[in-house]
Image (cartoon, rainbow, N blue to C red):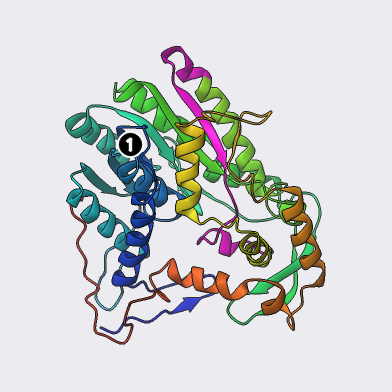
């Protein structure tokens, strides 16, 4: 079939297997061009098929030479429907990892469920013995609690006051004002239940209890802070409340793992084009302005560059475990430089529909969005018949 992008709002409902494979290869090639990392040997990545989770798995396997297990919730192709991008990404990763002689396994299912946790523990015990790094990179709009059976739904809203600021339709380039009503307390609590630290805590508790978490293991979850421009809808909104809970969980886990010389961190990462960030009003326009400034300054990084720097410098390098006053690793340090944010703020105040392509890198944002799904990728002929049915090697 001829596979073309089909969009619905901030979602692309199709994905291209060859384009996704090319994007994965580009990340692997980048890592293979960097110095090797003396780091983890057996890694579990929960939320492993896209974005920072995928990049973490690539760095683990190809920079540190680690064996990996990836847990993710993606769908295979069915009838006229393509597989999800994460499915194609994982198929490409698994093939490359096995060619490189790494042990590599995939578990597809709901990471929040007790069944998937148990299946993962059994696989670790059978194939790896134990894991010495656990990456928690789950992004989901809903979560069903494995004990109570209650389903929670997250929202992206401010807290306290109605919020109005600029946003952009990255398909049309129209800059407009977005107004978002504040969340109720119930919505705040539901968002924390989905995106906070409870499930991360459950994973570590169960891995530890099962004896498959290695002595001295490290665990890392990912977060974002960002500038004042985005605070009302992000860091000071419902998502921010969930991230506060995630960070509190990291501190508890750090104490829990400390007797065995283990470590737990939240890594605050840079703003990047992801399926999640595309859904947040204001953020795509901010990222477009940020990209323009950071590219001009030679400081721009994508997911793979960020994760390589995190592993090579902060987790296993000379700046090992350098943290801020709240115990967080700040790999967003380049984004948050004072001179970078001053330039972004100046652009922000001037941005309109008429000048958005001149004053920001909206074109780059849009291209990266489609590349998430395997489109607009150099070297791929999108007019050629492509088989959407792709198998994932070592799928359990």
Side of 76 relative to 186 (left or right): left
Would residue 113 be seen by someone viewing this image from the given angle?
no
Identity of the residue drawn at 29% across and 70% down? 17
Side of 103 relative to 280 (left or right): left
> Quick one: which residue is furthest to the bottom in this view?
383
Q: Pick whichever, 147 or 196, lies toward us.
A: 196
In the depicted structure, whether residue 285 falls above or below residue 40: below
In the depicted structure, whether residue 323 falls above or below residue 234: above
Side of 108 relative to 126 (left or right): right
Side of 335 relative to 79 (left or right): right
State the extent of the magenta-drawn residues as a range: 255-284
Q: Pick whichever, 22 or 127, lies toward us.
A: 22
Per the image, the residue denoted by label 1 is 43
| Quadrant in which residue 115 is drawn | top left
Few, some or many C-alpha atoms within 10 Å of disc 1 (few <14, some 14-19, many ≥20)?
many
In the depicted structure, whether residue 162 falls above or below residue 37: below
| Quadrant in which residue 374 is drawn | bottom left
Where in the figure is residue 366, as x and y percent of width and height? 54, 73
Identity of the residue drawn at 29% across and 84% down? 2
> Quick one: which residue is furthest to the top in this view?
259
Where in the figure is residue 364, as x and y percent of width and height? 56, 72
Where in the figure is residue 44, as x and y percent of width and height? 34, 38
Where in the figure is residue 59, as x and y percent of width and height? 37, 45
In the depicted structure, whether residue 68 falls above or below residue 125: below
Magenta segment includes 258: yes
State the SS at label 1.
strand
Q: Pick whichever, 7 or 102, lies toward us.
A: 102
Q: How many marks?
A: 1
Magenta segment includes 200: no
């Amino acid at each position: 079939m001829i596979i073309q992008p089909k969009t619905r709002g901030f979602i692309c409902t199709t994905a291209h297997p060859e384009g996704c494979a090319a994007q994965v290869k580009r990340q692997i090639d980048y890592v293979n061009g960097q110095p090797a990392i003396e780091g983890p040997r057996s890694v579990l990545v929960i939320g492993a098929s896209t974005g920072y989770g995928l990049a973490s798995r690539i760095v683990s396997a190809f920079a540190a030479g680690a064996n990996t297990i990836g847990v993710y919730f993606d769908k295979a192709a069915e009838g006229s429907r393509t597989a999800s991008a994460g499915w194609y990404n994982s198929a490409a990763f698994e093939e490359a990892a096995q060619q490189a002689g790494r042990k590599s396994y995939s578990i597809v299912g709901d990471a929040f469920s007790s069944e998937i946790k148990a299946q993962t523990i059994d696989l670790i015990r059978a194939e790896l013995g134990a894991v010495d790094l656990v990456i928690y990179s789950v992004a989901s709009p809903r979560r069903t609690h494995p004990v109570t059976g209650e389903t929670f739904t997250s929202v992206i809203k401010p807290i306290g006051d109605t919020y109005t600021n600029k946003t952009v339709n990255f398909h049309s380039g129209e800059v407009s004002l977005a107004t978002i009503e504040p969340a109720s307390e119930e919505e705040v609590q539901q968002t924390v239940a989905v995106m906070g630290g409870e499930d991360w805590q459950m994973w570590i508790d169960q891995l530890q209890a099962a004896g498959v978490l290695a002595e001295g293991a490290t665990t890392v979850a990912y977060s974002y802070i960002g500038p004042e421009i985005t605070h009302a809808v992000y860091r000071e909104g419902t998502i921010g409340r969930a991230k506060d809970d995630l960070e509190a969980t990291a501190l508890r886990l750090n104490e829990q793992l400390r007797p065995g010389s283990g470590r737990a961190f939240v890594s605050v990462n840079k703003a990047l084009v992801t399926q999640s960030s595309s859904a947040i009003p204001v953020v795509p326009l901010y990222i477009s302005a940020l990209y323009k400034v950071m590219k001009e300054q030679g400081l721009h990084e994508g997911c793979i560059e960020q994760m390589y720097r995190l592993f090579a410098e902060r987790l296993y390098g000379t700046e090992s475990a350098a943290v801020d006053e709240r115990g967080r690793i700040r790999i967003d340090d380049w984004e948050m430089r004072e001179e970078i944010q001053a330039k972004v703020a100046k652009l922000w105040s001037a941005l309109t529909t008429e000048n958005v392509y001149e004053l920001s890198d909206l074109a780059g944002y849009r291209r990266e969005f489609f590349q998430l799904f395997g489109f607009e990728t150099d070297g791929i002929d999108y007019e050629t018949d492509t088989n959407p049915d792709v198998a994932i090697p070592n799928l359990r």
